[in-house]
Amino acid sequence: MNIESYRDYCLSLGADVEEKLPFAKFKNGEGVLVFYVCGHMFSFFDCNDYCVISLKCQPDSIDELKARYDCIGNPYNESPKHWIGVNPHTAPDDLLKDLTCNSYEIVKQKYTKHKH
């Protein structure tokens, strides 16, 4: 999936999605685009090197996903216990969308359940 289509997909997940470039002050961080829900990251990638999208994932699913799909590996600069890295050039669009939606839901559920 190309970078524009992926960005559009992330923004389509809900009116509560925000996008920011929070690492602009850091060397090699100026191009990192981050998508947030409830003020917390659920997806990010480097616009200048669009080869890994980092996504939240259930820890008990990570090893199985890595074993099943060559396009899934370690995240960029996050804990591999709670995050996966997905190659947007080799991942099937449906898989990338499913994993991104899953990441969005993990974060949204975690940070909205405390507000009731």
Image (cartoon, rainbow, N blue to C red):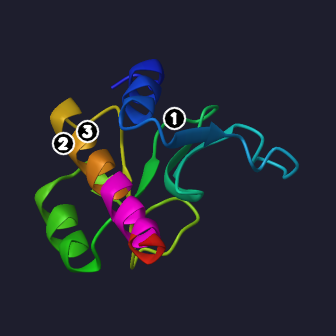
Determine if residue 56 is in view.
Answer: no
Circle 2 SS class: helix
| Residue bearing the label numbered 1 | 50
Q: Give the amino acid at mark 3.
A: Lys
Which quarter of the image is occupied by the C terminus? bottom left
Badge 1, how many Cα within 10 Å: few under 14, some, many 20+?
Answer: some
Question: Could you tell me if the residues under marks 2 and 3 are in contact, i.e. CB atoms within 8 Å?
Answer: yes
User: Residue 95 — which label?
Assistant: 2
Tell me the magenta residue range. 104-112
109, 58: nearer the viewer: 109
The image quadrant of residue 68 is: bottom left
Q: Give the amino acid at mark 2.
A: Leu
Give the image location of residue 104, x and y in percent.
37, 53
For the point 60% across and 38% down, the residue is 19
Circle 3 SS class: helix
Q: Separation of disc 2 and disc 3 at Cα?
A: 5 Å
Q: Separation of disc 1 and disc 2 at Cα?
A: 17 Å
Q: Give the amino acid at mark 1.
A: Tyr
Is residue 95 in the magenta section?
Answer: no
Give the image location of residue 66, x and y in percent.
22, 64
| Residue bearing the label numbered 3 | 97
Is residue 111 in the magenta section?
Answer: yes
Q: Separation of disc 1 and disc 3 at Cα?
A: 16 Å
Query: Which one is in front in this view, the residue at disc 1 or the one at disc 3?
Result: 3
User: N-terminal of the two: label 1 or label 3?
Assistant: 1
Question: Could you tell me if the residues under marks 1 and 2 are in contact, i.e. CB atoms within 8 Å?
Answer: no
User: N-terminal of the two: label 1 or label 2?
Assistant: 1
Q: Is residue 17 above or below residue 23?
A: above
